[in-house]
Amino acid sequence: MKKIFRAIGNFFLTIFKFIDRKIVTPITKKILWLYDKISSNSKIVERWLTKKTTLVFISLVIALIFFFVVDIKSTSLVGTTSEFLSKQKVTTIYNEEAYVVEGLPETADITLIGRSSDLYLAKQLNVNEITLDLTGLTPGTHTVPLKYTQSLSSITYRLDPSNATVVIYPKVSETRTISYDVLNADKIDTKLYVDSVTLDKDEVIIKSNEETLKKVAIVKALVDLDKITAKVGDITLENIPLVAYDKDGKVVDVEIVPGKVNATIKIVSPSKTVKVELIPDGSVNDKYAIYSMTSSVDNVTIYGTEETLSKINSIAVYVPVAGLESDKEFIVSIKKPAGVRYISQSNATVNVKLDTGITTDIKGIKISPINLASGLKVQGVSESDTVTDVIIRGVKSVTETIKASDIQANIDLSGYDVGEHEVDVVVSGNDTRVSYTARTKKVKVRITR
C-alpha cells in the first residue's frame, strides 16, 4: 500500500510541477515585463486594475487557461495506450532436486495495455515478474502457459512467448573422477614451473538426465594462474570452477556437486648450468684454418622441467665463418633448446682468429655403427669396410695435438634391416677448430639377426 500511495503522490506532484513550470511562471514573467513597460503610467494602471470589470476579465482568462490545461492533461491520462517491456526475466518453478528440464525460456516480452495513468503507476511499482510454474508435472513433454504478476488489475497484458514447450526428465547422478587443466601457465615468471597440482577432492557427483550424463567424458578443474603472484613453494587457490566436457572437448551442461574445489599448486624453479659450444658454420678460406674461437659467454643457466634439463649438457652456438679470410668478431645468438623456459644469456660476442692451415692424415680410425635396430647384428663385408683414414685440416699447433682417440667415425643404420647395404661414413672430432673428412666415403656392411 505504501508503494501505491507514494506513486499517487508522485503523480499529483508531477502535475503541479507541470502547471507551475508551463503556466504560472511564464504568466508572472509577462506581467512583470508589462509592469516595467508601463511603470511610468503606474497610476493609470492602478486605476485600471482596481476596476471590477478588469478583475472579472483577468479571472476569466486565467480560469479558461487552467481549464484547457487540466482538460488536456486529464485526457492524456485517461486515454488508452500501451507500454512495451522487452526481455523480462522468466522465473521457473519446479523441483530441481528431482527433475531436469529442457526448453526453458530465459526471457519474455510484455505488452501492457491500459490508461496512461495506470501504466504510469505500474511502472513506478516496478513489479514485472513472469513465472513458469511446472509444479506437479511428471516426466514428459508439456506445453505450459507463462504467467505475469499484475500490479494493477485495470491493466491487460500480452506475453511473447505466451507458452513454453518443455521436456521434463528424471534427474540421475553419477560419481566421476576429477582431473585438472592449468591455464595461463606461460604468464608466470619464465624461471618458474608448475611441478604439481593437488586437488582437495578426487571425485564429484554430476547430475542431469541419463542421456546427458552419457556425453560427459571428463570433469576438469580449471586452475587459472593469471591472477596469482607465483613464487617458489606451495600456493593454495580456492573456489576453482569445475567444468564437464564431452569426448570432443565441448562443454556439457550438467549440475556438478560440489561445483568448486580448492587446489595446492607446487611451483619449482629447476635450473642447470651448461657449456656454450662454439661450432663453425661453413669453412674458412682454403689458405687458412681457425686458430682460436673465444666467446664472451662460456656457460649459461637454463630453466625448465627436470626431465628437459637432464637431456641437455651443452648448447651449440653456430658461428658463420664461411669464406673468412681474416680475424673477425661476431655477435651470435644463443638459442633456447626445446622445452627450456628461460636462458640466462641470449647472445654472445665471439672472436675468431685465423692462421695458415695444413692438412694431415690420421690413419686407422675404427668405424662404429649407430642406431642399429634391436635384435640385429652388423659387420663389414671386408676388412676395408671397418676402418677409415681421416683427413684433418687446421692450424699446425692444433692438429699436432689431435689423436686417433679424439676422432669418431660412424655409420647410421636407422631404418636398415637384414641384408647387405652400402652406407655413408660420417666423421667428427672433439676440437671444432679442425675440419674432419673421411677418405672412405662409403662402406659395405652385412646385417643379420
Image: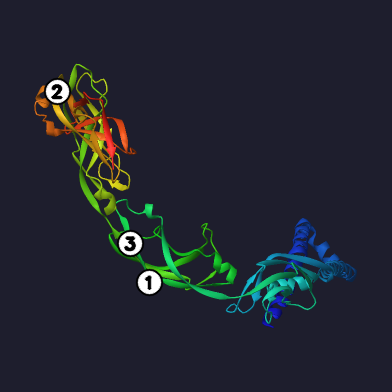
Rendered residue at 42%/64% (across/down): 179
Image-quadrant location for residue 264: bottom left
Label 1 neighbour load within 10 Å: few <14, some 14-19, many 20+:
few
Q: Is residue 39 left or right of residue 53?
A: left
Marks 3/2: CA–CA distance: 55 Å
Asked whether residue 223 is in view, the answer is no
The percent coordinates of residue 150 (x first, y second) are: 74, 76
Q: Is residue 247 above or below residue 113?
A: above
Q: Position of residue 149 (x, y in %)?
A: 72, 77
The quarter holding residue 119 reads bottom right
Mark 1 lies on residue: 200
Q: Does the image show residue 248?
A: yes
Q: Residue at x 39, y 59 (%)?
A: 225
Q: Are marks 2 and 1 in contact (CB under 8 Å)?
A: no
Tell me the residue that label 3 is attached to: 196
Q: Count the numbered circles shown.
A: 3
Of labels 2 and 1, earlier in sequence is 1
Disc 2 and disc 1: Cα gap in Å? 68 Å
What amino acid is at disc 1? Asp
Residue under pointer 2? 361
**Side of 4 where 246 appears, left or right:** left
Q: Secondary structure at mark 1?
A: loop
Q: Secondary structure at mark 3?
A: strand
> Distance of mark 1 from mark 3, alpha carbons?
13 Å
Q: Badge 2 local density, few (<14 within 10 Å), some, or many (20+)? A: some
Is 65 above or below relative to 7?
above
Q: Residues within 10 Å of mark 3 (few under 14, many from 20)?
A: few
Q: Nearer the viewer, mark 2 or mark 1?
A: 2
Is 80 positioned to the left or the right of 447 in the image?
A: right
User: What kind of residue is marked 3?
Assistant: Ser
Which is nearer the N-term, disc 3 or disc 2? 3
